[in-house]
Image: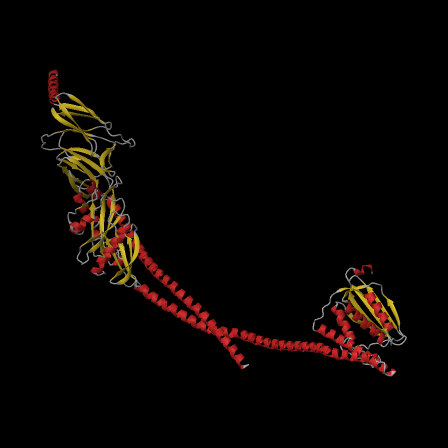
Amino acid sequence: MRLRGLLWFNAVFSIMRVALLASATVDGHVELPKSHAAPVQAKRYEIVTKGGVLSTQPPLAVVYLDGAFPKPASLPTEEVAQKNLTFIPALLPVRVGTKVEFPSFDDTYHSIFSYSPAKRFDLGRYRPDERPIPSEVFDKPGLVTLRCDIHEHMRGLILVLSTPYFVMTDANGNFRMGRLPAGHYTLKAWIDSRTTKEKPVDLKNGQTLHVDFP
Amino acid sequence: MNSAVQARNESVASFRTRLFTAIMLIVATLTALGLYLAQQKVAADAERDLQENFQAELSSLHRLEELRHAALEDRCNKLATKPRIHAAIEDNAIDLLYPSAKDELRDLMEGNEPPPEQAAQSLHARFYRFLDASGAVIKPPNPYDVGELDEKTEAQLALSKLPDKQQIGYIQRNGDSAGGVVDEVIAVPIFSTDTGDVISALVIGFKPLELQEKSTGAGIKSGIWVNGQLHLPSLQKSAQASLNEKITNAVANSDRNQDKFRLNVDSTPQLLFYRRLNPGSLFPAAYEICVYPVAYSIAQLHRLRWQIGGAGAVLLLGGFVASHFVALRFSVPVKKLALDSEENRAQRQRAEAALASTAEELQRSTRYSADASHQLKSPVTVLRVGIESLLRREDFKPDVYEHLSVLLHQTHRLTGVIDDLLLLSRMDAGHLQIASTPVNLSRLVDEWLDDLSALPDSPDVKIDKEFPANLFVAGEKQYTSLIVQNLLENARKYNRPGGRILVSAKSNTTDVVLTIGNTGRTIPTGENIFERFHHDSTPSAASGHGIGLNLARELTRLHGGDLRLVRSENDWTEFEVRFSAANGVNAVA
């Protein structure tokens, strides 16, 4: 029993060690734009346009490791729902080739479309009971602005990235991203549709790198 | 008399002629003045009417345009809220703009062009285009859907920047008709619903709203001048070219948005108005041009001239009739006046003639008296001298001397009468002048009373005197003496034997009154004793030549006094002579 336990521990430990040794971690802080909006009660975000610049409100950033990575065989399906005439989540980072479903939970029609260069699509008018759930595969990196032809105020963003390594900061701008491959990369922080900050990083296995985007 | 009537009629006729001429002159002047003023007014009025007409039509056009603009603004505001349009512009999907707007703007391009009267209500467009953020035209992927335009025309739709309010412009393109086609284009800004910024503009081309050609203004031509090109298809090519040149000059030389000028088109005078259709627009300036033939107002002027001329003629005629009646009316008093004056003249002439003959007679009689007196004096003198020389002889019988002395006495009387007559005639002729000096009347009366009593044939009368000594009167002694003599002689002559004479005098500061009374036969009332050559109605021994009292009164009057009979009754006759007192001499009295 003890031996079995030891073996199990060993096995687990060795895996952990391999994992620890074979991956790097980045944590840090992204200086987010000051939000003038009232404190959000529910954890809901929306997309706002200011002078043609789209961003989340309150501000969030997406930090990702730029670079060419092998394409996986399959990717999990993501979801951007429409609830109370808003997109949830308001900002969704996905890897290229991800299929995103757009389920509706409003008792009304929605007509989701995008004219963004990264992805033009038009799901047409549909009701919550539409099956299969309307979906789109985002196969080109870039920012996709989601709109509803019926509810003009609705905005959603899908940030299509070619990398699998990305994370969203918390409301304070702190992030932590692990299991990163070692090597020279560029770490980028998407802040809004016009602002993406970047820093070169040298990742080493088993190390945690601290990167701040001031 | 006949000639007088004729003269009077002539004068009335000339009066009428003058009156008529005056009325005619006034009427002619008024007519000319009226004509002149009316001409000025008509010309100004016609021009003003045309201008007002032009302005009113442009205003109505403007109102229609405003309707259209409001509708378009509404449309574009709605359009801008459309997520697809928004997405197409903001997400840089310009190629999707036209397809996205196609459904929204489908009604603009559908159907046929409406008739002009419904053009304002309709939003039927010939074409539309979107402008990008720099004001350039976004090429439509399928021009057929949005109205095909050639490159050049499409380029005219671009603006230097996106407008923040509606802009009106006019563009000319060579369409199928000969003179080309003018489109009214309206650029409507599209505001972002997010930012409020102008993100694009929709430029829509319409058929221009046309001025409603009123039936009154025949021959009015209206068109549009834009970018140095005149679009006035109803005018001939050559006329258009010259007109275009003039308008271009006028627009270039005037910074005003509207003006007018006269010009000749096809050798007919025209009045041209122009007014900027799109003041303040980013599009090139366009002007509405209206050409009004002045012929209409000239015809109106001609008509008015005839009317005023006719009115003047009627007025003249009325004046003629009026002058006739006025002359008739006025000629009655004038005639009467003429008659009256004629009568007056005749009367005056008669009076003058009478006066002249009277004066002549008077003069003649006066002269006769004087002549007679002179003629008489010499023979009487000769007679007296002869009698006196006879008396001086001593060889006659005593009774001869008596006769001779009677004769001599008579010649003395005759001389006295002649002297009196001479004096009277001198007075009548006004030749007698009084040299007034203080005369002692008291002494004078005393002397004469002495003389009277000394006369040989004095009757037995008693003489009483009641006057102060040294009573002075103003007068000439000779004549004063004559007055006193005459009165005293009468008092003695007409007295009765045993009678009485009372001479009294009294004086105050201005007058001295001498009263001479005598007894004897009284003078009957009504008998004018002061008349010249008066004779008693009752014969008596005492007789005079009848000029003594007359002479005395004339002389007293000449001296500024008077002689009057105070009373003659009950054996008492009393005369009163009033003399002027000699100044200051009678102070003691």
The residue lying toward the viewer, choosing from B577 and B346, is: B577
Pick the quarter of the image with the N terminus of chain A: top left
Q: Is residue A128 visible?
A: no
Colouring of the image: secondary structure
Residue B355 in percent (x, y) is at 65, 76
Residue A97 location, quadrant: top left
In the image: residue B532, left or right of residue B458: left
**Numbered label tally:** 0
Residue B533 versus residue B148 in the image, above or below: below
The residue lying toward the viewer, choosing from B186 and B346, is: B346
Q: Is residue B382 visible?
A: yes
Pick the quarter of the image with the C terminus of chain A: top left
In the image: residue B119, left or right of residue B578: left
Residue B84 in percent (x, y) is at 20, 43
Residue B350 location, quadrant: bottom right
In the image: residue B93, left or right of residue B372: left
Residue A109 versus residue B148 in the image, above or below: above
Residue B50 versus residue A65 in the image, above or below: below
The residue lying toward the viewer, choosing from A15 and B412, is: B412
The residue lying toward the viewer, choosing from B271 and B53, is: B271
In the image: residue A186, left or right of residue B537: left
Residue B467 in percent (x, y) is at 85, 65
Residue B65 in percent (x, y) is at 28, 53
